[in-house]
Image: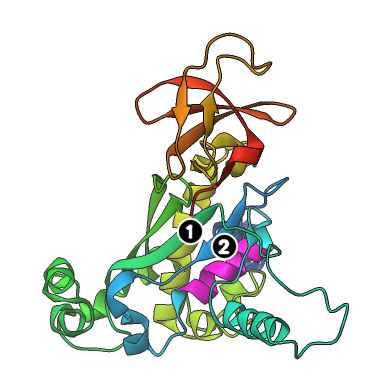
Amino acid sequence: MEGTKTRFAVMAMVTMALAAPAAHAQIKSAQTLRNEKMTEIPVCAKPLGTLAVQEPDGGQSWWTAQQLPAPSKLIKVFVNKSHCFTLVDRGAGLDSAMRERELGANGELRVSSNVGKGQLKAADYVMVPDLISSNADSSGGGVGGLLSGLMGSKAGRIASNVSFRSKTADVVLTITDVRSSEQVAMAQGQAKKTDLGINGSGALFGNTGVGAAGVGGYANTEMGQVITMAYLQAYTDLVNELGGLNGNASASNAQQAVTVAKPGRLLANAQGTGAAVRTLDPGMMLYPTGTKEGMMWEVQDELGNKGWVSSTLIQLAH
């Protein structure tokens, strides 16, 4: 009897020993899936508009202290992979394009090069990635002194209670409508190493493309991964917030103002019948309502008078 009990006990212990690695593998797999889910870039069915990504104002290059590329490059990776916006270059690429246009204007390009005015695509929105607070990827005390020198005393005070050892990042993304200058969305992201179990190998970001496109530092360093995760959270929230946009920012905004180029009259209707609303002098500013009938535009003047004017009498205001 005792021998039987002993055999059952041994068999139970063996079964538990064999089951432990399997259970551990399941837990590890679940954690891996969680991490992968948290590093997924959102994907849109159609672009929400054209986007230019700019660095923060004032030359606050906090990323240089972390030996990281500019955050705009990281955001562009997100944008390209999400298909949520069409990127327009307002940096080195635009500078090169403008040099080509200058060559064309000077007659240096071949005939039929088809490079010139009226071809650049307008940005509907401008996105600015910034850092609220961050710590350096090293041991030591607080980061306030470091950021104070890089970002100004105010930012230094904000970050002064952040420890180097905590490896956390608070970031913010803002997006501004180019035509109206309205700040249409703002999203904040926060991440820390201890929350996500980032191991510094960059493995968590293998599916995001962060390791390529000249932004490898964001995948290959612990602090880079933390900042990447924070920006990804902010970008995901921003895309969700902007999901209601119709994708045609030009049509959604007010029409561009025009100026009167030749003397004329503001007419009561598109047919030109009836008394004139008022006379129009060259240089006057008018605001189209968006309604047109043939060559006639419905406009409003600065006093609120509304009427119709021939498009031959006006030109776009600059």
Q: Quadrant of residue 11?
A: bottom right
From where the camera sits, is residue 73 visible? yes
Q: How is the image coloured?
A: rainbow
Mark 2, other Cα within 10 Å: few <14 / some 14–19 / many ≥20: some
> Percent x, y for residue 246?
63, 36
Residue 225 is marked as none
In this view, the residue farthest toward the front is 263
Tell which of 296 and 168 is nearer to you: 296
Which amino acid type corresponds to the residue marked 2 in the rendered image?
Answer: Thr
- Return the disc, 2 or 1, that comes first in the chain's sequence: 2
Residue 88 vertical position relative to residue 104 in the rendered view, above or below: above
Residue behind mark 2: 39
Residue at x-position 82% and y-position 73% = 114
Q: Position of residue 85 (x, y in %)?
A: 63, 55
Q: Which residues are magenta?
A: 72-80
Identify the residue position indicated by label 1 in the image. Answer: 126
The image quadrant where one finds the N terminus is: bottom right
Q: Image check: 14 left or right of 69? A: right
Taking depth in this image into account, of 312 and 118 the one nearest to the observer is 312
> What element does badge 1 sit on?
strand
Q: Residue at x 15, y 78 (%)?
A: 144
277 above or below 301?
above
Please say whether residue 4 is one of the residues in the magenta stretch: no
Q: Is residue 176 above or below residue 254?
A: below
What amino acid is found at the position of numbered circle 1 in the picture? Answer: Val
